[in-house]
Image (cartoon, rainbow, N blue to C red):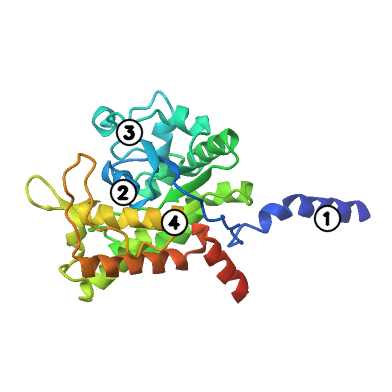
Amino acid sequence: MLRCHLWALSAFMALWPFASIAGPFPIPPLPPPKGALSTYHLGHSLVGPDVPHMLAQLAPNGHRWNAQRGSGTSLRAHWEPEEEILHFEISNPAPAYRDAREAVGSGEYDVIVLTEMVELRDALKYFDGAKYLRYWADLARKANPETRIYLYETWHHLNDPTGWERRIQQDLDSLWLGGLLGPDSRRNPRRPVYLIPAGQVMAAVVQAIEAGKIEGLVTREDLFARTPEGEVDTIHINDLGAYLVALTHFAVIYQLSPVGLPHQLTRADGSPAQAFSAPAANEIQKLVWQVVQAQPRTGLASVSASEGAQE
C-alpha cells in the first residue's frame, strides 16, 4: 500500500507543473521595449504586404521587418519543404522577403509574429497547427532567448454560418489560446507565445461602427476589400482594416497607446492608403488600446500588474 501511495505521489509531482497550467495561468509580463525593433512576420494573405509596412510607419524610426507569406498557407506548409506554398512568388517580393527557416533560426529578430491558416478548425484537425506552431516557436527560442514570439489572432469569413462575431468570441479561448497555443504553453510556461488580438479588435470596432460611433463608416463591410467583380471580399481587409490590424500590432509589440499616431499612411507599393477621418481614427485608436489592455495574453506589463492587483 505504501509503495502505491509513493508511486501516486511521484506521478503527481511529475505532472504538477503541467497540470497547474492546463487552464488559465499567469502570463509572465514582458518589459516594455526600448527603441525600434526588428520584426519577422510568417503567415498568409491576412498578413499581406500592407500590415507590416503600416506597422513600420507607426513604429519608432529604425523599425525593420521581413516576412514570408502565401495564400491560405498553414504553419505546416511553411515548415515542410516539400509542401507547396500557394502564390509564393507573388506574395514574397524583394526586399521584404526572407526565407522563414533562415530568418526565425537566425536569432536576428526582436519579434517573431506567427499566424495560422483560416479555417482554424481545419488547421488544428488536419494540418497539425499546434504542433507546427510549437516547432516555429522552439526554433525562435533556441536561436535567441530574448526574441519575443507572438501569435496574430485573425478572424473568419463574414458569412460564416455560425456567425462572424460569435466565431471571434468563442474561438479565442477554445481554438487560439486553447487548441493552438495550449500545448506550447504547457511546455513553455516561462517563455510563452503572446497574443496580438486583432480578431478581438476587429469585433470591437465593428460593434462601434454599426452603433454609429465611427464617423464615415456604416457597416462591417467598410473594413473589407472588394473582389474584381465589386462584391465584398468576406475575408480580406482593405486599407482601413489593414490600418486597424497594424495599430493592434503596434500597441502589443511596443506596449504603447496608439492614440495620436498618424492615420494617413502609404501602402507597401508606396501609394497613399485609404484613411479614416481624423475623428474616426482617434476613436479607432482608443478602441484598439482598450481591447489590447483588456487581454492578459498580450504580455503588457501594465495588464499583468493590473491582473495581479485584482487577484
Q: Position of residue 27 (x, y in %)?
A: 58, 58
Q: Earlier in the sequence, mark 1 or mark 4?
A: 1
Residue density around tag 4, few if under 14, some if 14–19, many if 20 or more, within 10 Å: many
User: Could you tell me which residue is drawn at 84 percent across and 50 percent down?
Assistant: 7
Residue type at mark 1: give it.
Leu
Q: Earlier in the sequence, mark 2 or mark 3?
A: 2
Toward the right, the furthest residue is: 2
Q: Position of residue 211 (x, y in %)?
A: 23, 76
Residue type at mark 2: give it.
Gln
Q: Name the residue under label 4.
A: 252
The disc at residue 9 is 1
Residue type at mark 3: give it.
Ala
Determine whether the residue tagged by mark 2 lies in a helix, strand or loop.
helix
Gap between marks 3 and 4 measured at Cα: 22 Å
Residue density around tag 3, few if under 14, some if 14–19, many if 20 or more, within 10 Å: some
Q: Mark 3 points at which residue?
A: 96
> Mark 4–mark 2 contact, CB under 8 Å?
no
Residue density around tag 2, few if under 14, some if 14–19, many if 20 or more, within 10 Å: many
Determine whether the residue tagged by mark 4 lies in a helix, strand or loop.
helix
Of marks 4 and 2, the one in the foreground = 2
Of marks 1 and 4, the one in the foreground = 4
Of marks 3 and 1, the one in the foreground = 3
User: Does residue 83 appear anywhere in the picture?
Assistant: yes
Gap between marks 2 and 3 measured at Cα: 15 Å
Residue type at mark 4: give it.
Val
Gap between marks 1 and 2 measured at Cα: 55 Å
Q: Mark 2 points at which residue?
A: 57
Query: Considering the image in quadrants, where does the N terminus appear?
Result: bottom right
Residue density around tag 1, few if under 14, some if 14–19, many if 20 or more, within 10 Å: few
Q: Nearer the viewer, residue 42 or 214?
A: 214
